[in-house]
Amino acid sequence: MGEGATALRGQLRTMVGEHIPADFLGAFTEDPADLEIAQRFCGLLADRGLLCLAWPEEFGGRSASVWEQTVVREEMWAHHEPRGAQYMGINWVGPAIMRHGTPEQQRRHLPPITRGEVIWCQGFSEPDAGSDLASLRTAARPVEADVQPDGEGGTARQAGDGGWLVSGQKIWTSYATMAQWCFLLARTSRGARKQQGLTIFLVPMSRAGIEVRPIRCMIGPHHLNEVFLDEVRVGPADVLGTVDDGWKVVQEVLAFERVGIARYARCERLLQAAPSALGDRWDDLPAELRGRWAGMLVHCRRARLLAYRVLALQSQGRVSPVDTAAYRIAVTKLDQDSAEVLMEMAGLARLAGAGGRRFSRAVQDHWRYAQASTVASGSIEMQRILLARALLAAS
Ligand SMILES: Cc1cc2nc3c(=O)[nH]c(=O)nc-3n(C[C@H](O)[C@H](O)[C@H](O)COP(=O)(O)OP(=O)(O)OC[C@H]3O[C@@H](n4cnc5c(N)ncnc54)[C@H](O)[C@@H]3O)c2cc1C
C-alpha cells in the first residue's frame, strides 16, 4: 500500500483514540450522544481533508489513491464506523453524481458531502423487489405538460418535461429517519425488459408525500425503515443520468457499495483483541476453539486480498461485478463465522475485568450486525449465482 497509506493509518488511529470513546459501538444506538459523536467526527475528518480524500480535487477531494481511501474505510469500520451513515455519501452517492450528474447537481450535492454535513439514504428495495430489484413497483407518473405542436408533425415536449408524481413503497431503507436526501429508484416507463424504464431521482426527504416508518430490529435503531411515497412531485432537475436508463447507474452503485464496507477490518480487530481481553482466561479456552480463532484470522486475510483485487480494478476505472461478488461472499461469511467464534469467547471475557466486558459488548454488537450481512446489499445466494454464471460462461 505504500508509506503514505501507513502514515495515514497512524493519523486515523490517533484521531480515533483522541475523539472516539473506547466503548463506542457506532452511531446507531439508543443513545443520541453516539450520533452526535459521529457527526462531530465527520466534521473533523472533513477539516483535515480526510473525509473524501480519494475524490478528485475538482470535486473537493485530494485525488488520493484508492488505496488511501481503503485505509480510511478499514480504520473506520474497525472502530465501529465513527462516520455514521455518511460513509454512503462518500462511497457511492458522491461518485455516482460525479459520473452521471449535471454540473448543477454536482455543485449542489457534492460540497455538502465533502463537508460531512449531509446524510443520504438508498431507496431501492421494495416489499416484493429485493433480489429481483428490477421488478419494483414504485411508479413515476408523468404530469401532463402543455403539449405544443412543434410545426413538424411532432410535439415539442417529451413525457416527464412537466415532472412526475411518484407513488409506492420502499423497505429496509437504512438511515431514512435521519437522511436529508434519498437516492430513489422508480419506474418511469415499461420497456421490453424490466430493467428498462427505470430512473434515478435525487429527492429531498422533506418533500411533500414522503413518510418514514422505522422498523424495530435487533441491529438497533435507524438501520431499517419503510418509506412511503404518495404522489411525490419530482422534476427533470431531480433526474440523475438519463430518464428510463437508471439501471446502468444502479449496477455501478451496487458494485461500489458492495466493496465499500471493509468488514474484514472489524473482524480482524476483534479477533486480535481476544487474547488480551481474555487475559489469563485465554489458556482456559479449548484448543479446538483457539484453532478456529486462528483459522478466522487467515479468513480475514483472504477476504482482504479479494477486496484489494476489486480495488485494483477500480483504480483503473473498471467496475467488476464478478470480482465484487467473490469478495462479498468471502467477507459476509467471514462476518458470520467470526461472530460465532467470538461469541464463544465473549462469555469468558466478561469474567476478565473491564476490558473483557467492553470486548464482550463489542462482540455481541458484531454478532447481531453479522446476522444481516449475508442479506444487506444483495443476498449471498444471489452473489453465488452471479459468480457461478460468470465462471460457467468463461469455462
Ligand atoms: C441491514 C440491511 C440494510 C439494508 N439497507 C437497504 C437500503 O438502505 N436500501 C435498500 O434499498 N435496501 C436495503 N436493504 C435491502 C436489501 O438490499 C435486500 O434485503 C436484499 O437485496 C434481499 O432482498 P429481499 O430482502 O427482498 O429478499 P428476497 O429477494 O425476497 O430473498 C429472500 C431469500 O430468497 C433468496 N432468493 C431470492 N431470489 C433467488 C433466486 N433467484 N435464486 C436463489 N435464491 C433466491 C435470497 O437469496 C434470500 O435468501 C437492506 C437490508 C438489510 C438486511
Image: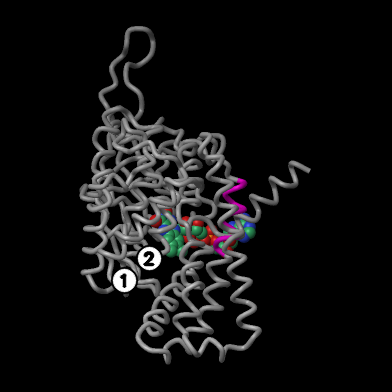
Label disc, if present, on residue 391 of the rendered structure = none
Q: Is residue 4 visible?
A: yes
Q: Residues within 10 Å of mark 2 (few under 14, many from 20)?
A: many
Quadrant placement of the C terminus: top right
Q: Exactly how many numbered labels are in the figure? A: 2
Q: Amino acid at mark 1?
A: Phe
- Seen at 38% across and 56% down, the residue is 10
Q: Along the horizontal axis of the image, is 323 left or right of 119?
A: right
Label disc, if present, on residue 24 of the rendered structure = 1
User: Magenta span has 80?
Assistant: no
- Seen at 61% across and 83% down, the residue is 289
Secondary element at tag 2 = loop
Q: Quadrant of residue 332?
A: bottom right
Query: In this orientation, which residue lies closer to the viewer: 136 or 313?
Result: 313
Q: Amino acid at mark 2?
A: His
Magenta span main SS:
helix
Specify the segment rendered in magenta. 322-332
Respond yes or no on whether mark 2 lies under 8 Å from ligand 1.
no
Q: Residue furthest right?
A: 395
Q: Quadrant of residue 381?
A: bottom right
Q: Which residue is mark 2?
A: 80
